[in-house]
Image (cartoon, grey):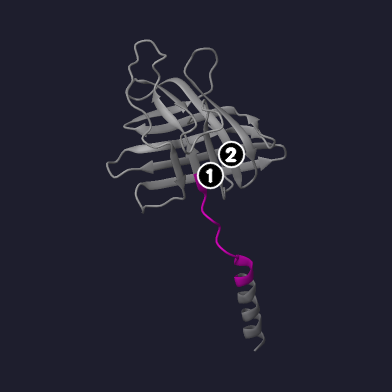
Amino acid sequence: MRASILGAALLGAVVISCGPPPQPPTGRLVWSFACDTNVMGQLDCGGAPDPLIEGITRQMPTPALNVGCFVDVTGANANFRVSIEQTRSNGERFGVTRICGSTTTSGGNVANSLVTASLGAATISNVAPGTGTGPSCEVRVTEITTSSIKGQFRCARVRDNSLNARRINGVSAPSTPSTADPEWAEFQFSNCYAGAGVCR
């Protein structure tokens, strides 16, 4: 009898301690991209088909979406890694495969950042911040907690895997949606998990 009471108590404790499952990460990206015709010899090669990508990881409805958000906060410092990428029925992928880096919990410029993005049939990979006129992607964070992040990024003069020079920016009003600054694409994630690690 005592054993059965003890077993029931333990089972109850396990049920109580489990709680609801964690909510999946939700992501939102507002952006534009095109070939960077400011680079000598680069011709226009088309831009983003849709300025908005948002939602949670899903297979249906199409296009399929893969969303990830990881944030590690230690004191006043934070590492993060986010992704939001859609796959269309023709196999083309659009979005950011990875934006990662280190910042402070008050936000601002991001150190040691890397950007990898899918631009339909093309990709840019592991683009670091740069100086001067070299190819680069700048990243900054406007808000970060252990479970959410908001930020901006832009890229210029970056060669994709077809050797076209690319740029990524925001979206000018009156387009809907638009970004606060048309020079900067915006990302926003919630329900993030721990496990960002070091951006490399």
Q: Is residue 144 visible?
A: yes
Relative image position of residue 56 (x, y in whole percent): 46, 50
In the image as oriented, which residue stretches furthest toward the bottom?
Answer: 1
Q: CA distance from mark 1 to mark 2?
A: 11 Å
Label 1 neighbour load within 10 Å: few <14, some 14-19, many 20+: many
Q: Position of residue 55 (x, y in %)?
A: 46, 48
Position of 7 relative to 148 (above/below): below
Q: Is residue 4 left or right of residue 97?
A: right
Residue shown at 53% from the left, 29% from the top: 153
Q: Is residue 175 magenta?
A: no
Residue at 64% in and 38% down: 143
Residue that sits furthest to the top in the current view: 40
Queried whether the magenta region covers residue 21, the answer comes back as yes
The amino acid beneath tag 2 is Lys
Judging by the rendered image, the residue that carries numbered circle 1 is: 69
32 sits left or right of 81 in the view: left
Q: Quadrant of residue 123?
A: top left
Q: Which residue is mark 2?
A: 150
Along the viewing direction, whichever of 193 and 152 lies nearer the viewer: 152
Residue found farthest to the right: 75
Is tag 1's residue or tag 2's residue first in the polypeptide sequence? Answer: 1
Q: Amino acid at mark 1?
A: Cys
SS category of the residue bearing label 1: strand
Q: For the magenta stretch, what is the residue range?
A: 15-27
